[in-house]
Amino acid sequence: MDTLLKNALLATPIGNEARKGKAQREIRLIENAMVGIKDGKVAYAGPADSTLSASNEVNCGGRLLTPGLVDAHTHLVFGGWRQKELPLKLAGVQYLDILKAGGGILSTVEHTRAASENSLEVKGMALLLEMQRLGVTTCEIKTGYGLDIENEIKQLSVIRKLRKTQPMDIVATFMGAHAYPKEYSDDRPGYIEYLIGEMLPAVAKENLAEFCDIFCETAVFTPEESRRILLEAMKYGLRPKIHADEIDPIGGAKIAAEIGAISAEHLIQVSDAGINALAQRDVTAVLLPGTSFYLDKPYARARDMINAGVAVAVATDFNPGSNPCTNMQFVMTLACLKYKMTPAEVLTAVTLNGAAALGRASVCGSIELGKKADIVMWEAEDLEYIFYRYGSNLVCSVIKDGKFTW
Ligand code: NIG
Ligand code: FE
């Protein structure tokens, strides 16, 4: 064994797939546990065993160990910021109205188009470091601030570079259908034809993305357009995700179920029928309480989803507009207090179920034999503490692929 973590409190969900219903709160909790690591993978995880040894033995002093956090929904590569929208927000101007007036996502598109690939990479590195120090070992990044071939590919190339240089597993999602760029503001069907006829083939040719996402929302993409675009993306091997029923309940969840999307995300306004459809088709719900907080919107009905048998993941939605916060620990506390999810349910939501939303549940998301040794050591003696002591970074160390990265 390369490394042996001793005298730990181990808390981890179990399995190679998303946990739903009651199973979402059935985690493994072991006091005085040991975790052994070999070749970057978990080689032992269980009660103290005096027959085990390693060249590097670490006494955890009773500290909590959990799987590395999985942030399954971010928009991390972008130019500029949007702090200038703060007074508008305070004056009560709504998110979609800022977008309609050419601000919001479109202002970030302008800054992202103007930014060099190198400057986006440097900015991305700093943000990933911030996330890593907060306990994240796997994240997803969506594009959608380029909205033309050149700039969407630029964002995807930045993601590829970051993946190679940063100690973080990064999953790329193409989101050309995030908004209509200004050059198509009077020809929306024209943008959809361009996206399907030219952007999708270009993205697929470079093999830069694994998933395709769409903003299915009032005045953005209709459910019918979402279905069409995602079905086209599937022809190129991109697995579908949907920003569904975030602000208005227009039926994105039902489309997610119908086409067999891997996840439906946001879901603040989802209907009962939408929830049942997700449960029937095993679509993971990726809920984003930081966005409800920052937009001052209602919180998604996580409990109803869990009761209906939907696997719930929780992520940040980090982006410059609707949630400019990278902190998974903060969204964990929000999920606990606002969704009324138990600490065990949230732990599963931010590890194994997040991994499932990225098609990675057999690789990471739990501390089990053969999985990646992606582990967070917390400055905490029990699981509840990390939800309770919000606002401070409670991470003591992060182990990525078996190595202490900080
Ligand atoms: O998930 N809803 C659409 N996209 C992002 C916000 C992006 C932005 O405002 O820049 C979201 O909330
Ligand atoms: Fe988002």
Image (cartoon, helix red, strand yellow):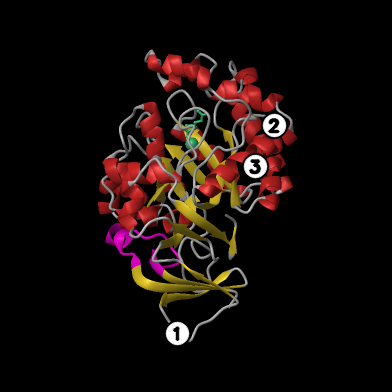
Quote the CA–CA distance across marks 3 and 2: 19 Å
**Mark 1 neighbour class, 10 Å CA radius: few under 14, some 14 to 19, many 20 or more:** few
- The residue to which callout 3 is attached is 125
Q: Is residue 74 above or below residue 383?
A: above
Q: Is residue 16 above or below residue 209?
A: below
Quadrant into which the N terminus falls: bottom right
* 402 displayed left or right of 333: right
* 21 displayed left or right of 213: left
- The residue to which callout 2 is attached is 151
Please identify, in this view, whether the residue under mark 1 or under mark 3 is nearer the observer.
Answer: 1
Q: In this view, does 143 lie above or below 304?
A: above
**Residue type of the residue flagged with mark 2:** Asn
The structure residue drawn at horizontal position 36% and vertical position 49%, both measured from the top left corner, is: 278
Q: In this view, does 182 lie above or below 196?
A: above
Quote the CA–CA distance across marks 1 and 3: 41 Å
Task: State if disc 3 and disc 1 touch (CB < 8 Å).
Answer: no
For the question of whether residue 401 can be seen, the reply is no
* 311 displayed left or right of 406: left
Q: Measuring from the top left, give residue 320's x and y in whole percent.
A: 53, 29
Q: Measuring from the top left, give residue 48's x and y in whole percent.
A: 41, 79
Q: Which of 103 and 120 is in front in this view?
A: 120
Q: Measuring from the top left, give residue 347's x and y in whole percent.
A: 37, 55
**Residue type of the residue flagged with mark 1:** Ser
Q: Residue 50 carries which label?
A: 1
Q: What stretch is highlighted in magenta?
A: 8-28
Instruction: Tell me which corner region of the image, top left, top right, bottom left or bottom right, holds residue 116.
Output: top right
Q: Identify the mark nearer the N-term, 3 or 2.
A: 3
